[in-house]
C-alpha cells in the first residue's frame, strides 16, 4: 500500500469544449513518485499537473531508459469511474521494467496509483459515446550521468488525457503497409517491453507508409522478414477459413491486453484460435483462394481496427468488400460494451475506481 499525499489544485482548468482528439489535453492533476537506490520507491503524491525539470545530462535523454503503459478510464451512468483490466497493465509494467533494468513497482501499488489520480480527476472523464480518459503511466531514468549503466534514480509519473472517439463515423477499415526493409524488434531485444525505443525504431517506416497513403505499418520478423509480427501500436488478427489466427508471443511483439481479451472472447464464442507463425506467403495464398475473410488490429486506443487492404511490395490484398467484418464488429461491440458497462462483465475485467 502506498501512502499517497494529495496536494490538489486551487485553480482547476476549464474542461475542453469541442473535439478532444488524442493526447493533446491534460487534466488538473498528475501522480508522481521518486525512486532512489537504497531507499526504493518513495514520496508517492498527487499534485497539480506541472512541468518537471531535469538536468540535460539525465540518462533518459541519452540512452532511452524508460517505459510506459496505456489504458483508459470510462464513466458509468451513475458517475462512477471504471478501468479495464488494470492488473494486466501492472503485470506488463513489471516485465517491461525488468527488461530495462528499471526497479519494479508492485502490482497493487501500480493500480492504487492509477486509481488515486483518476479518482481526483474523475470529472475529466468525457461522457460522449466512444470517448474516454486515456491514462499514461511512465518511468524515466533521471541520474545526471553520461556513463552507460542503469540509473540509480527514477521518476514514475501518471498523466491523464481526455480523448475523443477513435472512430467518428463507424468503424472505418484502414490500409496497411507491410514493411519489408526496416524492422522493429528481434527476439531477445525490446519488442515485448512497452518502451519508447520501439517507437523510435518504427518512425522511418511509418513516414514511408504515410507518404504512400497507408495508415499503419505491419512489421515482419527481424530475422527472415517473412513472418507477421504486429502493427504500429496494435496486435494483428486474421480470420482465415473460419479460424482466428494471430502471431504467437515470441518475445519480439508486445503482449497486448486487448489481444488477450479478444482471444478469450473468440474461444468463448467457439472459434478455433491459433497463436502461431504466419508468413506473408500464407496470407497471399489465403487471399488468392478467398479464405482471408477478415483482418483486424487490436489495441487500447482503437480497441478493434478493421483492415481493408494490405500492401506487400507490388501486391495489394483487398480484404472483404470495404466494410467491417462480422467478427471484428462483434468484438468491438463486446469489448467496448464491457468497458462502458452496456454489457454485463462476466470475467471481472471492469474495475471500479474507488
Ligand atoms: C501498447 C501496444 C499494443 C497494444 O496493447 P494493448 O494492451 O492492447 O493496448 C500493441 N503493440 C504495441 C507495440 C504497443 O505498444
Image: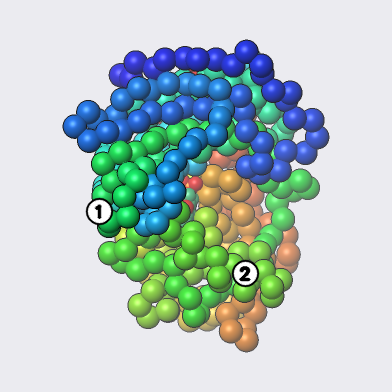
| Residue 340 visible in the picture | no
Image position of 225 with respect to 230: above or below = below
**Quadrant (top left, top right, bottom left, bottom right) of the N terminus:** top left
Q: Nearer the viewer, residue 19 or 203?
A: 203
Q: Nearer the viewer, residue 9 or 94?
A: 9
Q: Which numbered circle lies on residue 149? A: 1
Image position of 52 with respect to 204: above or below = above
Q: Position of residue 47 (x, y in %)?
A: 51, 21
Question: Which residue is rendered at x = 61% and y = 64% of the image?
Answer: 216
Q: Which numbered circle lies on residue 207? A: 2
Front: mark 1 or 2: 1
| Residue at the right extreme of this rendering | 18
The answer to whether the residue bearing label 2 lies less than 8 angstroms from the nearest atom of ligand 1 is: no
Question: Which residue is rendered at x = 47% and y = 27% of the image?
Answer: 31
Q: Residues within 10 Å of mark 2 (few under 14, many from 20)?
A: some
Image side of residue 253 versus residue 203, left or right:
left
- Residue 274: quarter of image: bottom left
| Residue 119 visible in the picture | yes
Image side of residue 176 versus residue 267, left or right:
right
Q: Position of residue 294 (x, y in %)?
A: 59, 63
Amino acid at each position: 500500500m502506498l501512502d499517497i499525499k494529495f496536494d490538489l489544485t486551487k485553480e482547476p482548468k476549464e474542461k475542453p469544449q469541442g473535439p478532444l482528439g488524442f493526447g493533446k489535453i491534460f487534466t488538473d492533476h498528475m501522480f508522481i513518485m521518486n525512486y532512489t537506490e537504497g531507499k526504493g520507491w518513495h514520496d508517492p503524491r498527487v499534485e497539480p499537473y506541472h512541468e518537471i525539470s531535469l538536468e540535460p545530462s539525465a540518462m533518459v535523454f541519452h540512452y532511452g531508459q524508460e517505459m510506459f503503459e496505456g489504458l483508459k478510464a470510462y464513466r458509468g451512468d451513475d458517475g462512477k469511474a471504471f478501468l479495464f483490466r488494470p492488473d494486466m497493465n501492472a503485470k506488463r509494467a513489471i516485465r517491461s521494467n525488468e527488461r530495462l533494468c528499471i526497479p519494479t513497482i508492485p502490482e497493487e501499488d501500480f493500480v492504487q496509483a492509477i486509481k488515486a489520480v483518476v479518482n481526483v480527476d474523475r470529472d475529466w472523464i468525457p461522457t460522449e459515446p466512444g470517448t474516454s480518459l486515456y491514462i499514461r503511466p511512465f518511468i524515466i531514468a533521471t541520474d545526471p550521468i553520461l556513463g552507460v549503466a542503469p540509473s540509480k534514480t527514477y521518476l514514475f509519473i501518471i498523466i491523464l488525457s481526455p480523448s475523443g472517439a477513435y472512430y467518428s463515423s463507424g468503424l472505418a477499415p484502414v490500409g496497411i503497409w507491410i514493411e519489408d526493409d526496416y524492422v522493429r524488434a528481434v527476439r531477445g531485444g525490446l519488442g515485448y517491453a512497452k518502451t519508447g525505443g520501439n517507437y523510435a525504431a518504427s518512425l522511418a517506416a511509418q513516414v514511408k507508409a504515410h507518404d504512400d497513403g497507408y495508415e499503419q505499418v505491419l512489421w515482419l520478423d527481424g530475422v527472415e522478414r517473412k513472418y507477421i509480427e504486429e502493427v504500429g501500436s496494435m496486435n494483428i488478427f486474421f480470420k482465415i477459413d473460419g479460424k482466428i489466427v494471430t502471431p504467437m508471443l515470441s518475445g519480439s511483439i508486445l503482449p497486448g491486453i486487448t489481444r488477450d481479451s479478444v482471444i478469450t472472447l473468440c474461444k468463448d464464442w467457439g472459434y478455433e484460435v491459433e497463436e502461431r507463425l504466419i508468413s506473408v506467403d500464407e496470407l497471399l495464398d489465403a487471399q488468392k483462394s478467398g479464405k482471408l475473410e477478415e483482418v483486424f488490429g487490436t489495441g487500447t486506443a482503437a480497441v478493434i481496427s478493421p483492415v481493408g487492404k494490405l500492401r506487400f511490395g507490388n501486391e495489394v490484398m483487398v480484404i472483404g468488400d470495404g466494410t467491417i467484418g462480422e467478427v471484428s464488429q462483434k468484438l468491438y461491440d463486446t469489448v467496448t460494451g464491457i468497458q462502458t458497462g452496456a454489457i454485463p462483465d462476466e470475467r471481472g475485467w471492469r474495475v471500479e475506481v474507488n
